[in-house]
Image: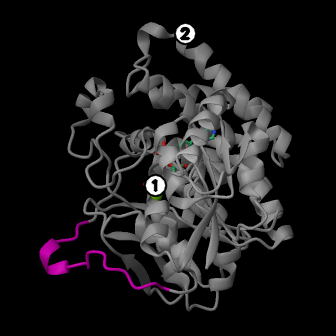
Amino acid sequence: MKAISVLGSTGSIGTQTLQIVEEFPDAFKVVALTAGRNLNLLIDQIQRHKPEAVALADESILPELKERLQILSKGCLISQQPELLVGKEGLNEAASWSSAELVVTGIVGCAGLLPTLSAIRAGKDLALANKETLIAAGPVVLPELKNSGSRLLPADSEHSAIFQSLQGTPWAENARLSTGIPTPGLRRILLTASGGAFRDWAKEDLAKATVKDATSHPNWSMGRKITVDSATLMNKGLEVIEAHYLFGLDYDHIEIVIHPQSIIHSMVELADSSVLAQLGWPDMKLPILYCMSWPERLETSWKRLNLAEIGKLTFGTPDTQKYPCMQLAYDAGRIGGTMPAVLNAANEEAVAQFLEEKISFLGIPRVIEAICEKHKVDLKKDPSLEDILFVDLWSRKLVKEYVSMNKDNI
Ligand code: NAD
Ligand code: MG
């Protein structure tokens, strides 16, 4: 029975992880949960999974959580009270909870960085969904992984596909340890992209894109931030940087392929020109389960892939004119150092501003480009954790200033 800590348990990744735990009660148990503000769902999760510890990102809701758990306890609707933790320290404690063997990182954004580092430092294995952590802090996270012996298993569907395709090759160990050391036989990574919400829109129409349009993904059901990232294709750009850190390939050998059906989740080309792929329905439970059961595979009753039913798989080249975020991410990745952290924070803040209807959809890449440009003079090539946390805050602050100064044309 594997003991699991779920960070961001009330989100899309978190709830799907808990569904898997419920489906396989003999294989997994939950020992710690962390959540933002969704108290009703969190309480339901506590009742179902009886975690040893629960951490709240927002301390102000602790009194209400305590009160509601006491009422449930008096009514015998809850058998054991979890230890309640709060704030940054609380998240770190839940991430490094002593009985946890695997930590699923489902917090969205760079807020996941410090809890992920706590889990690594405690030697826990990681199911990494929270890609922003690696993108912002790859140069810090990779050496920590190497030192701690914790094993990083990618939960992002594309990186899981690459990881799965490399199993059974002599370089599987390299990929699993995510040492950033180039995998000798791996020549090229082909990251597939559905094309997001606007794949069938003309470039000229994107100026009219609303929040509702950008938060309706054609194939995947996900949190709001990553759904907007999929619409701008920044998600794919971020995944290029994530693949670079995970598999040690340079940016010239990581390509994006548009694949609207989202059936092939990514591919690897090997030294002899063979291409290996992993296929499945677009359902995040599959890559999450693989992280949880690795190196085993568990028998599921999930819908089986039927290629005849799908009929056609198609592929295309991404349109960098229509989606400038992809190029911004490649550029930031190639520059390296603190630049990916600045890109990531600018993107998080620009997406937040778009969701609050303060900037237009096309304003997102404009803002990010301006902030990355400004950072070039202060770039740190070999950043420390403090440098990364500093530029993360700097970048967010600058986005807010930029938006208030350019209100009328973004
Ligand atoms: P989500 O918005 O649905 O859930 C986010 C979770 O993080 C919630 O539990 C929320 O309470 C918590 N949270 C938010 N802000 C926080 C903060 N400041 N401190 C602590 N906790 C906080 O997001 P999601 O779609 O589940 O995505 C989670 C991560 O997984 C992201 O990094 C995303 O890129 C990645 N990912 C998601 C999917 C998917 O299908 N949803 C696929 C691949 C990768
Ligand atoms: Mg993905």
Up-down relation of residue 222 to residue 374 (above or below): below
- Tag 1 residue: 15
Whether disc 1's CB lies below 8 Å from ligand 1 is answered yes
Residue at 55% x, 57% y is 129
The answer to if 301 sits in the magenta stretch is yes
**Badge number at residue 404:** 2
Looking at this view, is 95 or 135 the one in front? 95
Q: Tag 1: residue type?
A: Thr
At label 1, counting other C-alpha atoms closer than 10 Å, the crowd grade (few under 14, some 14-19, many 20 or more) is some
Q: Residue at x 28, y 55 (%)?
A: 219
Local crowd size for mark 2, using a 10 Å CA cut-off: few (<14), some (14–19), many (≥20) = few
Q: Is residue 56 magenta?
A: no
Q: Secondary structure at mark 1?
A: helix
What are the residue bounds of the magenta stretch?
Answer: 297-314
For this view, does 73 lie left or right of residue 322? right
**Image location (x, y in percent) of residue 202:** 21, 37
